[in-house]
Amino acid sequence: FLVVAIFAPFLAPYDPYDQNLSARLLDPVWGAKGSWSHIFGTDAFGRDVLSRLIYGARLSLLIGFTAAFIAGFIGVTLGIVGGYFGGKVDAAVVYLTNVKLALPVILVALSIASISGGSILVLILVLGLLTWDRYAVVVRSLTQQMRDQEFVLSSLAAGASHARIIFREILPNLTNQIIVVASLDMAIIILIEAALSFLGLGVRP
C-alpha cells in the first residue's frame, strides 16, 4: 500500500477527479456488465473507483502514520515515566489514562471535526491526541516489570542516570511491543478517519 501510494500518478489508470457522467455507476470487471476499462467500476459521478482508491491510500496512510506517531510519542512517554518512577508520578499517569479512556473517541472526533470543517491538520492532531492510551497502558506495565530486573539494577549500581537507563536499557526492549501497538493503532485511526468521511466530516475533497 505504501508503494502504491508513493507511485500513485504512475499506477492510477485515470485522474481520480475526472468526472464522466456518461459512464456513471459502471459495474466492476467481475460484474454482469463490467469491463477492463474500469476494473473496479465507476461512482455516481463517473469517476474511476480504482484510481480513487489508489490516490486515497495517500491520504489514509498520511493520517494513519502521523496520528499514530503523535499518539505513540505521548503514550510511550507517559507509560515509561509512570512505570519507571512509580509513586505519585505513576498515580498521575494512571489518572490521565483513566480520564482518556472515559472519553468516547468517535463522539469527540465528530464534534471537533464538525467545528474545524475537515482540516487535515486538525484531524491528525485530534486522532493522535485521542488514541495514546493503548501505548501508555502497555508501556507502563512492561516498564514496571523491567525496572526491577538485574540489568536495570546493575546500571543503577554503576551510577547510570535515570535518563540513560530509560533510553539505553528500557526503551530498546520495548520496541517490538510498541511496533505491534502502533500497527493496530494506525488501523483504528484509518477506520475512524473513514467513518468521519462517510458521515461527511472527514477531509474535504
Image: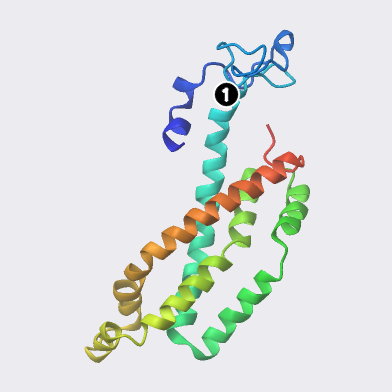
Whole-percent x, y for residue 202 in the image = 70, 42
Residue drawn 42% across the image and 78% down it: 143
- Residue most extreme to the left: 158
- How many other residues sit within 10 Å of disc 1, few (<14), some (14-19) or many (≥20)? many
- Where the C terminus falls, by quadrant? top right
Tell whether 52 sits left or right of 170: right
Amino acid type shown at disc 1: Leu
* Residue located beneath label 1 in the image: 50
Q: Nearer the viewer, residue 22 or 80?
A: 22
Whole-percent x, y for residue 13 in the image = 52, 16
Residue drawn 58% across the image and 57% down it: 128
Tell whether 109 sits left or right of 72: right
Whole-percent x, y for residue 55 in the image = 55, 29
Position of residue 182 relative to residue 156, above or below, is: above
Position of residue 152 relative to residue 50, above or below, is: below
Q: Quadrant of residue 164?
A: bottom left
Whole-percent x, y for residue 116 in the image = 73, 48
Position of residue 114 relative to residue 18, above or below, is: below
